């Protein structure tokens, strides 16, 4: 069973994470994204909107499942997840994450790959707590955070691992707009629909200009940075932290 529901409305594709209350990021979810990405990358798709759940957009990596993997399989999973994130980040069309529930850790990673993040006015949590469980924030995500937040705010978010309410996330730039629940879906769809009306080649050129420095750094360093993540993941003291964190799933 697919953990992503896909629906096409006009020229927009709507994806809904559908893997339980917490929407954990698992190997199966990554495989589902891999199957869907060619459709998102096709010329017929002119914009993408990603939804999570009401309680959790996504709680992050499925720690109970991933802790069972050996180093080879975990490296394969993380490399593939990282590749999915990069392909979403570099889609040459407007993209949006609609965030009703908490978007934390890997959930925030996924949301940060889209051009826009619209969230409910209900102050749920957004953030990257990787440092608290012993692993670095994925390299691409770190580059994105530094591009959209001030140096001070980016440092605070990445170094402390603290979650912030959506209202504060909006203030520092990791959330683009907060919208009342009853208007959230309509406003998010309208934003992407409007942007999709632009000439596709023009939008592609403008987006490439926006992200080209991040792409250059990422492609140059991703293999070494991903290996750093894996090395930390398998440190004995980190495994203890991850095992404790897994109990919350």
Image: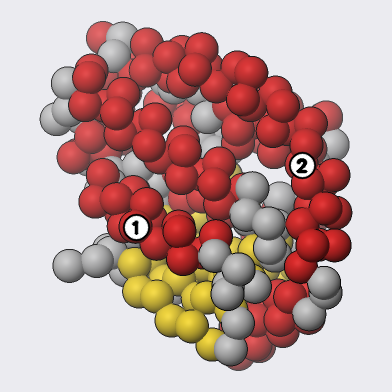
Q: How are the colours assigned in the image?
A: secondary structure
Vertical side of 53 occupied by 78: above or below: above
- Is residue 156 shown left or right of residue 60? right
Residue 68 x, y percent position in the rendering: 14, 30
Q: Is the residue marked by circle 1 packed among few (<14), some (14-19), or many (20+) residues within 10 Å?
A: few
Q: Is residue 65 left or right of residue 63?
A: left
In this view, the residue in front, 130 or 138, is: 138
Q: Position of residue 133 (x, y in %)?
A: 40, 26
> Quadrant location of residue 74?
top left
Question: Is 75 located above or below residue 55 in the figure?
Answer: above
Task: Point out the tag, 2 or 1, that comes first from the N-terminus.
Answer: 1
Which of 97/168 is in front?
Answer: 97
Q: Residue 139: horizontal and vertical position, in percent? A: 58, 26
Return the mark for residue 211.
Answer: 2
Element under label 1? helix
Neighbour tally class for label 2: few under 14, some 14-19, many 20 plus, Cα within 10 Å: some
Which residue appears at 82% of the width and 45% of the height?
Answer: 210
Residue that lies at the very extreme toward the left in this rendered image: 68
């Amino acid at each position: 069973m697919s953990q992503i529901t896909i629906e096409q409305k006009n020229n927009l594709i709507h994806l809904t994470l559908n893997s339980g209350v917490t929407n954990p990021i698992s190997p199966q979810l990554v495989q589902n994204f891999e199957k869907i990405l060619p459709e998102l990358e096709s010329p017929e798709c002119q914009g993408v909107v990603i939804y999570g759940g009401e309680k959790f957009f996504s709680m992050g990596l499925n720690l109970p499942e991933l802790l069972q993997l050996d180093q080879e399989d975990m490296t394969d999973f993380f490399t593939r997840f990282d590749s999915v994130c990069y392909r979403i980040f570099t889609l040459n069309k407007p993209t949006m994450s609609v965030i009703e529930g908490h978007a934390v850790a890997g959930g925030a990673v996924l949301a940060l790959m889209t051009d826009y993040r619209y969230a409910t006015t209900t102050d749920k949590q957004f953030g990257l707590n990787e440092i608290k469980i012993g692993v670095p924030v994925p390299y691409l995500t770190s580059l994105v955070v530094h591009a959209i937040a001030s140096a001070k705010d980016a440092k605070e978010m990445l170094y402390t691992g603290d979650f912030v309410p959506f209202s504060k996330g909006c203030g520092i730039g990791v959330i683009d707009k907060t919208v009342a629940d009853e208007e959230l879906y309509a406003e998010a769809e309208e934003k992407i629909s409007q942007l999709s009306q632009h000439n596709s080649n023009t939008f592609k050129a403008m987006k490439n200009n926006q992200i080209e420095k991040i792409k250059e750094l990422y492609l140059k360093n991703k293999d070494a940075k991903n290996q750093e993540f894996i090395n930390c993941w398998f440190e004995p003291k980190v495994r203890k932290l991850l095992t404790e964190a897994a109990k919350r799933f």
